[in-house]
Image: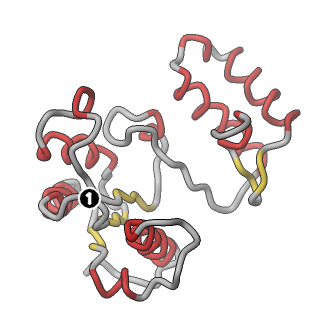
Amino acid sequence: HLTELRERIAIDGAPIAYAAFVSAAEKVSAAGGDELTFFEQVTAIACVAIAFANVDVTILEVGLGGRLDATNAIRADVAVVTGVAMDHEAILGDTLEKIAAEKAGIFKYDQFTVVGASGLPEGVPLLVDAALAAGSPPQIVDDAMIAAVPPVALVGEHQRANAACAIAAINALYGKVSAD
């Protein structure tokens, strides 16, 4: 978050109401949430708040991402990995293969997967192979998909690649594409 913790949980485009945040936090605490890490607590609070808000679609952004991320406890219809690069090596691994394997830990059987191009190009086949091995057919974001993205407000060419991932995820969610 930039200014306030509540901005980590947005419902209908606005930060969660203070009362709703406090109510969800109290429920998490009462269920033993004080034993969780900060990120795990915020993830649990978000899940409780979202359940009470009865939303139609939920987008959960990971922390470091992957197999051991708190968000991996939630079953998703679509999983997105925008790419892999050499980052967070102390936690995710010291090779691209290890990092890709950790990130791919979110792929589940019979789930649609989007594999992006924001990371190192040699990471894409690692993610694709992991998705196929998990029974999670991948949509690979390619140059044509990135080129089709209209200008975005965020700076950096990688933002267009990330936006292409988001569009692919939306299309997958609404059945407009097939991984076959």
Of residues 39 and 76, which is closer to you in this image?
39
Question: Which image quarter is the N terminus in?
Answer: top right
Percent from the top left, x then y, of residue 9? 68, 44
Residue 145, given in percent of the width and then of the height, sits at: 36, 83
Query: Amino acid under label 1?
Result: Gly
Q: What residue would you read off at disc 1?
A: 119
Image x and y of residue 176, in percent: 46, 84
Figure quadrant of residue 102: top left
| Quarter of the figure with residue 44 | top right
The secondary element bearing badge 1 is classed as loop
Task: Tell whether 4 sits left or right of 154.
Answer: right
- Of all residues shown, which one is farthest toward the right? 19
Q: Is residue 41 left or right of residue 166?
A: right
Q: Is residue 109 above or below residue 99?
A: below
User: Between residues 153 and 163, which one lies in front from this camera angle?
Assistant: 153
Q: Is residue 94 left or right of residue 168?
A: left
**Residue 29 appears in which quarter of the rendering?**
top right
